[in-house]
Amino acid sequence: MIPDLKYKDGGLIPAIIQDVNNNEVLMLAYMDRTALQKTIETRRTHFWSRSRQRYWMKGETSGNVQIVKEILYDCDEDALLIKVEQVGKGACHTGNRTCFYRRIDL
Amino acid sequence: MIPDLKYKDGGLIPAIIQDVNNNEVLMLAYMDRTALQKTIETRRTHFWSRSRQRYWMKGETSGNVQIVKEILYDCDEDALLIKVEQVGKGACHTGNRTCFYRRIDL
């Protein structure tokens, strides 16, 4: 059963996607209730694209799907942490393994 | 120098906070430009609280501050990943080490 989560900002909840094997954070994207339901049912991550205004399955064109191993939610019930097996070269459309490949100088 | 990031939803960008030592995802919170600037300058995480409408430094009351080790940003420039040394027992106000301590049944 899906817990009662807080969907804000147009019915969306942020989902952090983490590699279940090495704990690398791969990406952050947004789900609504339907995308979360699809994710649970298919064990593949589904998101709502704010820019394209449609659902998308990660890897639907690249083949780099994400096999869902664990879904966690936070104390405030307004964020998800999804641990996945990343298929293929990586999560990022740039070809990098993670979308977080650039650093701010400290 | 801070790159040109995309601040959405009221000038905010989500920041994933990750333990630099074991790669555990500890929490997700929101920053605006000022909070990010404070975070860089002080090497302590600062956020904008949407519910309280004010800036807060993580650990300002509990003492469980987060010492910033690395700040990354994603390909879309609309999310941050901040690696920290978590001081004290943990990041969550519930006493848990991570805010993501509950699981959705698959």
Image: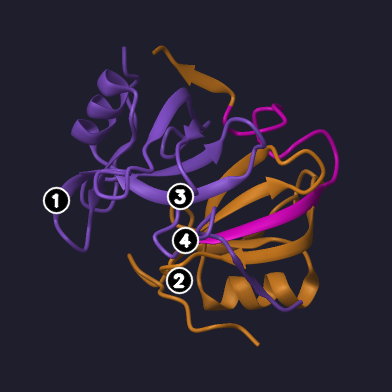
Chain colours: A orange, B purple
Q: Chain of mark 1?
A: B
Quarter of the image where one finds residue B11:
top left
Q: Which residue is mark 3?
A: B91
Q: Position of residue A68 (x, y in %)?
A: 77, 61
Q: Residue furthest right?
A: A88
Q: Say which of marks 2 and 3 sits in front.
A: 3
Q: Residues within 10 Å of mark 1 (few under 14, many from 20)?
A: few
Q: Chain of mark 4?
A: B
Alpha carbon of mark 3 to alpha carbon of mark 4: how far?
8 Å
Q: Quadrant of the C terminus of chain A?
A: top left
Alpha carbon of mark 4 to alpha carbon of mark 2: how far?
16 Å
Q: Say which of marks 4 and 2 sits in front.
A: 4
User: Residue B95 bears which disc, if any?
Assistant: 4
Residue extent of the magenta highlight = A79-100
User: Residue A77 bears which disc, if any?
Assistant: 2
In this rendering, do the residues under marks 3 and 4 share a single chain?
yes
| Mark 1 and mark 2 residues within 8 Å of each other at the beta carbon | no
Alpha carbon of mark 4 to alpha carbon of mark 1: how far?
23 Å
Which residue is rendered at x = 82% and y = 43% of the image?
A: A21
The numbered mark, 4 or 1, whose residue comes first in the sequence reads 1
Which residue is rendered at x = 41% and y = 28% of the image?
A: B67
Alpha carbon of mark 2 to alpha carbon of mark 3: how far?
15 Å
Q: Which residue is mark 1?
A: B54
> Does residue B100 show up magenta in the picture?
no
Q: Secondary structure at mark 4?
A: loop
Q: Residues within 10 Å of mark 3 (few under 14, many from 20)?
A: many
